[in-house]
Amino acid sequence: MYTCGITPYDAAHVGHAATYLAYDVLQRRLRDLGHDTQCVRNVTDVDDDILRRARQLGVHYLDLAAEEMARFDANMDALGLLPAFSEPRATSAIPDILGFIGMVLHSGHAYQAGGAVYFDVSSSHDFGQVSHYSRDEMLALAAERGGNPDDPHKRHPLDFVLWQPSAPDEPAWESLWGPGRPGWHIECSALALRELGTTIDLHGGGTDLIFPHHECEAAQSEAATGEPFVRHWMHVGMVGLGGEKMSKSLGNLVFVSDLLKDWEPAAVRLAIISKHYRTAWEWEDSLLPAAVTRLATWRAAGDGDAGLDEVRAALDDDLDTPSGLAAIDAAAATGGGVSSAAALLGLTLA
């Protein structure tokens, strides 16, 4: 499985943690069923956002990435995430990206214009297969999320960049199409192909990545390989604060590192997985005291397998963690030890 990682130009927030915890709980249940899992989580260490932030701070973009990735990894370790199968950086894959773009051009699905290489969406009969959005919805989201539909070099406003010229103060790599840097979407396609092969079982991230990111990934990957890119998509609902989606651009963020200063990591994890992964929800500070109380009750119940089968059944029903937690509550209330059931959710009661 492949889950889109962070662009490391600021600290990880609760919305990030919700995505990676959903994949973590999924892996735990799959392993509990006897499957082997390999979860790749990339690092987007070169794109518009990180370059803009590094410019604002007056630092090298890779120094900024290294600092933020160290903080991210420490936060995720504290929350008890299983280690990623690999955590490749986009900058490690420039040769793979160049080769991938060559494959897309060779297949007739891309063109060169204005010193850049663009994917031709009109050549993809399945464009829209991931999002199922209308053309107008796609155009609005492309404009909102860095797709630049007004780029005069594009044949179609929804065409997207595979390779682009770098600004004078940006990193650049040599290519057959001139010096430049990769587009955002091509990084994940090249890394997924390199790390996991032509077709992956499961791919996802937050619902904000459905379009344009995942739509474009699917189109270019299938254009390059001629094979299905993803068997199953899994998208995690957005976490809000104050009625708006938590985002760096709005600044309405609850940082994981701040929560961990005052609360036990298990309580932070429990507060987040108390919400169903698929739904959008609002962060409330009251979630943490409630999680602390819940943990105390479970710990008082002692060791044992009570509630384990019920938690398994809940997870098998679209990863229904809220029902799983309720099952543990019920088992603990009857005096059964619930350590095994909690452990399946990544919560150690010792």
Image (cartoon, rainbow, N blue to C red):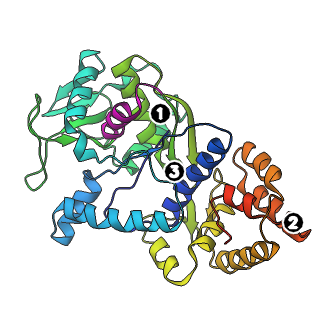
Q: Nearer the viewer, residue 313 or 168?
A: 313
Instruction: Say which amino acid is labelled 2.
Output: Gly
Q: Position of residue 17 (x, y in %)?
A: 52, 61
For disc 3, the neighbor class at 10 Å (few under 14, some 14 to 19, many from 20) is: many
Is the residue under label 3 in contact with that under label 2 (CB below 8 Å)? Answer: no
Q: Quadrant of residue 158?
A: top left
Quadrant location of the C terminus? bottom right
For disc 2, the neighbor class at 10 Å (few under 14, some 14 to 19, many from 20) is: many
Q: What segment carries the magenta color?
A: 185-199
Instruction: Say which amino acid is labelled 1.
Output: Arg
Residue highlighted by disc 1: 135
Which numbered marker is on residue 206? 3
Q: Is residue 205 left or right of residue 249?
A: right
Query: Residue at coordinates 31% horizontally, 63% vertically from top-left?
Result: 9
Instruction: Say which amino acid is labelled 3.
Output: Gly
Distance from label 3 to label 1 (Cα)?
Answer: 21 Å
**N-terminal label among 2 and 1:** 1
Q: Nearer the viewer, mark 2 or mark 1?
A: 2
Q: Position of residue 13 (x, y in %)?
A: 47, 67
Q: Quadrant of residue 304?
A: bottom right
Q: Is residue 8 left or right of residue 136?
A: left
- Circle 1 — which element? helix
The answer to whether residue 139 is above or below residue 109 is below
Residue highlighted by disc 2: 336
